[in-house]
Image (cartoon, grey):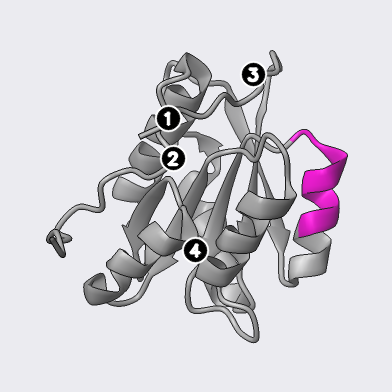
Amino acid sequence: MPRRQVKEIKRDRLTLAVYSSDREVRAQVKLALSDLLANDLPPVKVNEFATPPALIKALEAGGIDGIVLDGESTPLGGMGLAHQLRDEIPDLPPVVILVARQVDAWLATWSRADAVAQLPVDPLTLPALVADVIRAARAGTLTSRMTVPGAASRH
């Protein structure tokens, strides 16, 4: 799988974007990711987005280090939005998709997400997963599609 280069910007804070049409999901993600993802990463600032145009505008402006997208959002779900962003935003930061059903995780490979997390938000596993994809992006080892835990091969 090809490796993606993500521009690393040295800052004293990581800025994460969270997209969901559901304010409760945004609040859960914000709470789980707030302050510090890991000891080796800077403190975190979480920006919430309820609409795709607002998120796209922020991504075009730059300064976002990682994205968490709700796969259950309406009218545009996180998987469709991830697919669109991959085509339209150069140097897209790492993308984590939230899915409600594990059986939907295979669809995240179509979306070209870097990782998949389960809904409801797990405040222990989500920060670790986001930290892992950010570290991989910074190291230049983030592949275009990470393996989805629990997903079987269709070959």
Could you tell me how far apart the alpha carbons at marks 4 and 1 are, in whole angstroms? 26 Å
The residue at which mark 3 appears reads as 8
Q: Quadrant of residue 51?
A: bottom right
Residue at horizontal 65%, vertical 62%?
84
Which circle marks residue 7 in the picture?
none
* Amino acid, disc 4: Gln
Please report whichever mark, 4 or 2, sits nearer to the chain's N-terminal start.
Answer: 4
Q: Which mark is residue 28?
A: 4
Q: How many marks?
A: 4
Disc 2 + disc 3, Cβ < 8 Å: no
Q: Secondary structure at mark 1?
A: loop
- How far apart, in angstroms, are the residues tagged by discs 3 and 4? 27 Å
Residue corresponding to mark 1: 142
Whichever of callouts 4 and 1 sits on the residue coming sooner in the sequence is: 4
Q: Earlier in the sequence, mark 3 or mark 1?
A: 3
Q: Nearer the viewer, mark 3 or mark 4?
A: 3
For the N terminus, which image quadrant? Answer: top left
Q: Main secondary structure of the magenta part?
A: helix
Q: CA distance from mark 2 to mark 3?
A: 17 Å
Examine the structure image and report whether residue 153 is included in the region drawn in magenta.
no
The region drawn magenta spans: 56-63
How far is the residue under mark 4 from the one under mark 2?
A: 27 Å
